[in-house]
Amino acid sequence: MNAAVSAAPTVPSSPHVMNTYGRLPIAMSYGRGVRVWDVNGKEYLDALAGIAVNTLGHGHPKLVPALQDQVAKMMHCCNYYHVPDQERLAQMLVERSGMTNVFFCSSGLEANEAALKLARKYGHDKGIERPEIVVYEKAFHGRSIATLSATGNARIQAGFGPLVEGFIRVPVNDIDALKKATAGNPNVVAVFFETIQGEGGVNPMRVQYLRDVRALCDEQDWLLMIDEVQCGMGRTGKWFAHQWAGIVPDVMPLAKGLGSGVPIGAVVAGPKAATIFQPGNHGTTFGGNPLAMRAGVETIRIMEEDGLLDNAARVGLHLQTRLLTSLLGKPGVKEVRGQGLMIGIELAKPCGVITQRAADAGLLLSVTADSVIRLVPPLIMTIAEADEVAAILLPLIEAFLAE
């Protein structure tokens, strides 16, 4: 490892890479567990996990040899042929979700795009010529034209109009607003939301609201589509965050943590949506490839062997309690919220500078929705490591609020 570090002593410039990211001046070299090292040898505690992607942390001793084995066998074959691990991973997801069928793709954007297509086809199959889908304020579903249109952020939509039509936008956790916005509208086909909004500021849907929307969708014969791309795969302490409400959606996009770093996406469907797509309706080149499927199978297997759902709930509660105890009632702190290892700290003013300050102090995190510090670490994080996060972060917040 030391040789690799010394071989790349500085952060490389990127004159030929499109300027699409506001990058920190850091280039990562390698990781172990919940820690990573940059090319200069500096160590960081990773409380971002590639934005909720590295479920098993870095270099997991059970995952690495499984992926090496798969790379040596086959990384890709097209969907003209059966891929055995597609069947294995689909069965694992069906068993843990209570749903019936799965379509595999390569990212959360693709999974959400597929969900939107499912909803439109569902409407057309019922004779609805211009289907409409309910979406939410502050939502984020991706950056393709359709998922960008479903997203509730005018700033990232700017410059990409005209947006796709067919969306009705409502506030979170307000069942009366949802009923009012859809009253008498025969074109509504689905309600689409994140159980806990990620990019929108770690905003959870309330348990009763989730149950009320499920009931309304049943009453109106709409699809209930729940985006679990960021909050799913054990992050809250259950396989999928909506399971805390005891409901089952009709459509559930997944990605991020499902492959522990290998690009993967999935759309899990229940009986109402499972047969909407037929051959020719949808597809993908890379989706469901053998490497991604092996990563998904091994991720779930290791999560269960290592008890990571319970760990996420326990360590997340400990970290959130530490943060609440120190920050609640402090001037400039609006709220500490989330569930499991998906935590948001909302401050009263924009706090983007904390991302760099935390990195300087050896902690990786992000700031989303301008003023929300987001923590989504690997699910292998221990109580001791959570205490390290708090020990680094809390003084940074206090110093920032004092400015």
Image (spheres, helix red, strand yellow):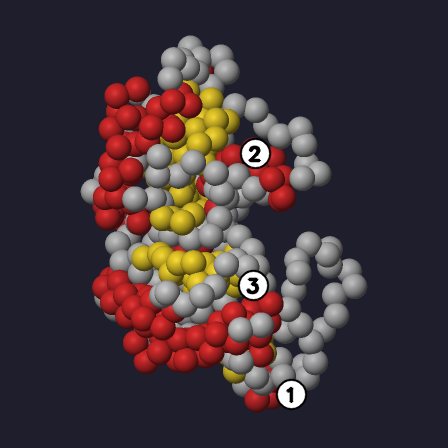
In the image, residue 106 lies at what x, y percent?
50, 47
Look at mark 1 in the image and give the residue it sits on: 6
In the image, residue 82 lies at what x, y percent?
40, 42
All told, the count of numbered labels is: 3
Question: Depth check: 24 or 168 in front?
Answer: 168
Q: CA distance from mark 2 to mark 1?
A: 46 Å
The answer to whether residue 158 of the structure is visible from this angle is: yes
Q: Is residue 281 above or below residue 265?
A: above
In the image, residue 158 lies at what x, y percent?
67, 39
**Nearest to N terminus: mark 1 or mark 3:** 1
1 and 3 marks in contact (CB < 8 Å) = no
* Classed neighbour count for the residue bearing mark 1: other residues with Cα under 10 Å, few (<14), some (14–19), many (≥20): few
Look at mark 3 in the image and give the residue it sits on: 351
- Asked which secondary structure carries label 1, the reply is helix
Q: Amino acid at mark 2?
A: Ser
* Residue 401 in the figure: left or right of residue 258: right
In which quadrant of the rendered view does residue 360 lie? bottom right
Mark linked to residue 149: 2
